[in-house]
Image: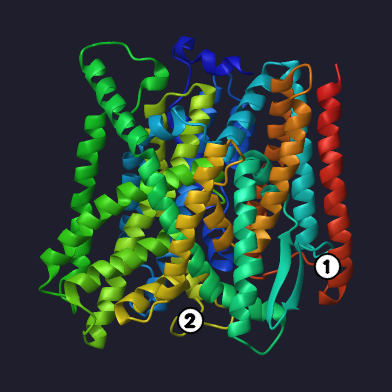
Amino acid sequence: MASIAGTAQARGSAAELTLRGVLLGGLITLLFTAANVYLGLKVGLTFATSIPAAVISMAILRGFKDSTIWENNIVQTVASAAGTLAAIIFVLPGLVMVGWWQGFPYWTTAAITGTGGILGVLFSVPLRRALVVDTPLPYPEGKAAAEVLRVGSGSREGAAESAKGLSVLVWNALASAGFAILTQMRLVAGEAAVWFRAGSGATGISGGLSFALLGVGHLVGLSVGMAMFLGLVVGWWVLLPILTAQMPMPGSPEVWANSVFGANVRFFGAGVIGVAAVWTLLRIAGPVIGGIRSAMAASRARHSGEALAIEEQDLPIAIVFFGSLAMLVPIAILLWSLVTGGPLAGSEVVLIAGALLFVVVIGLLIAAVCGYMAGLIGASNSPVSGIGILSVVAAALMLVGLFGRDQDPDTTAALVAYALIVTGIVFGVATVSNDNLQDLKTGQLVGATPWKQQVALVFGVIFGSLVIPPVLDLLNTAFGFAGAPNAGPNALPAPQAALISALAKGVLGGDLNWAMIGWGALAGVGFVILDEVLGLLGKLRLPPLGVGIGIYLPMVAILPVVVGSVIGWFYERWASRRADPEFASRMGVLTATGLIVGESLWGVTFAGIVAASGSDSPIAIVGEDFAGPALVGGTILFVAMVWGLYRRTRTLVLSD
């Protein structure tokens, strides 16, 4: 399997960027993007679509004799770019929540989404060398997708090793999907949680019974896992008991703890992420500049007629530069159409100039930070919404600097809406750069052509931006959003959009929770120093971004990732002592990948069932009175399945 990448230069005219592949990626996009929009608005989480797209692509293209691993890679690239663009729902519903929009105007919504997404592709082209080629970052989902593609290609050729890998992938995917189905039937619990008082405060222990999150933990490794665990300890078991003791509330410890976590601890985490992001930028500034120089050198070599190796063929830097400038024109036209004739009329020039400068400067910074975060912990678990929080605060502060806070209600409302729209464009940059470097890592591992993947990413953004607006409008019409005018009883929570719109109003109104952000920033400096000291001592490092993520995200999502990182560490120690340690390690990656694939594919299927039925629990066969047995039985079953699946992998590794 490892020889696939090595055949890249010798593959001749093998199929890669084909019309068939782009169209198939577009069709998969329709399903995945709609599912991600609904689930993100419902529970505040989206899932990475690259691995499920790769599985579906291989199943379909196996019927074509001329299909290749590189064409399958293009399909998953298109689908994953479009699927990840659905994270724009973390911003745009805020415009409905604040009453600025009553629905989602099709072309305006598509333009906000598409222009930011294409800039995200272009901004991250010169980052590929710095963050994908010359880096030790793990890129868990990128590596997992590469293993899926390799196994599919190898099994088609009858390789014995690939047959074992495919067996692991399929069995683990079936087990992961089967457990997820049981949770939706409510026969087993989806999470195990205990909430209790801690002195005069409250806290708890909560972990999702999720095979996908466990698999992600295996792939990110022990260093990131322990950094996230440190963040979890600081956020849930240090800060939360202190803050809840200061803010007593009636009701259960669970409601109390989660309320204080959302209102205070997450802002502390956002402060940590902000400092860690700045430090990350300072650390990678040199490699990024080197990457840009390499891109310019490659461009000069191309113009001089020198043949470049396939893996060096990025989009020419001139196309990246002038393409980025060209994208600012439709953004300026879009912003002009939104400003002129309203409360902000007469300030068009200063507003649009400030917004364009903001999009370029903050967009470039965010592209680098999000690409690094995706490489560190994976696109699914990267706290892009945390970046959205920092972005909307910065956009709102820019408007405060231009206009001040002493404005009439109509002007303030227009400024809030403008801040959300500019943040939406920058958020498109963030979400796509968060995903496409992961895809480019997959491409590097299977020997794909970078510029062809980068073109495929643009196609994916276009497909996604055309699909998202009608889905958003349909959900708004059918359910509405919690907190929006005229929201119905079944309104979708859209938690990130609610928080981001509240931040915009808070900054422009002067009542933002700056205290927790400031304390988090101070703690972030401490975590940066801790990581550097550990590095100097040669100890296990604790990346500060990982710590910030552990504070910012709910424990239910963090704890299984931490457990998965420990399981992966034990497995890798075992694999390193085998006769063929590389094969044993690869089988571990496929074990984790299968866990991600199964739950992800079921997530798509279940979202369609929910949307079609109009019910939150369309396949539940028991009621709330079964919660106790579901929790005990589900936890026992989950542990037993994890043990059994890893034992099966080890048996296959040891077999002849």
- Cα–Cα span, label 2 and label 1: 32 Å
Where 396 sits versus 579, above or below?
below
Name the front one of labels 2 and 1: 2
Give the left or right position of residue 465, taking residue 652 as reference.
left
What is the secondary structure assignment of the residue under circle 2?
A: loop
Other residues around mark 2 within 10 Å, as few (<14) / some (14–19) / many (≥20): some
- What residue lies at 47% left-to-right and 24% top-to-bottom? 448
Where 257 sits versus 230, above or below?
below
Of the 4 image quadrants, the one containing the N terminus is top right
Return the mark for residue 483.
2
What is the secondary structure assignment of the residue under circle 1?
A: loop
Q: Position of residue 530 (x, y in %)?
A: 53, 50
Q: Position of residue 19 (x, y in %)?
A: 43, 31
Q: Give the labeled residue for mark 1.
A: 621
- Residue type at mark 2: give it: Gly
Which quadrant would residue 94 be assigned to in this image? bottom left
For residue 614, say whether it is visible: yes
Which quadrant would residue 550 be assigned to in this image? bottom right
Q: Earlier in the sequence, mark 2 or mark 1?
A: 2
Q: Position of residue 61 (x, y in %)?
A: 58, 29
Nearer the observer, 67 or 458: 458
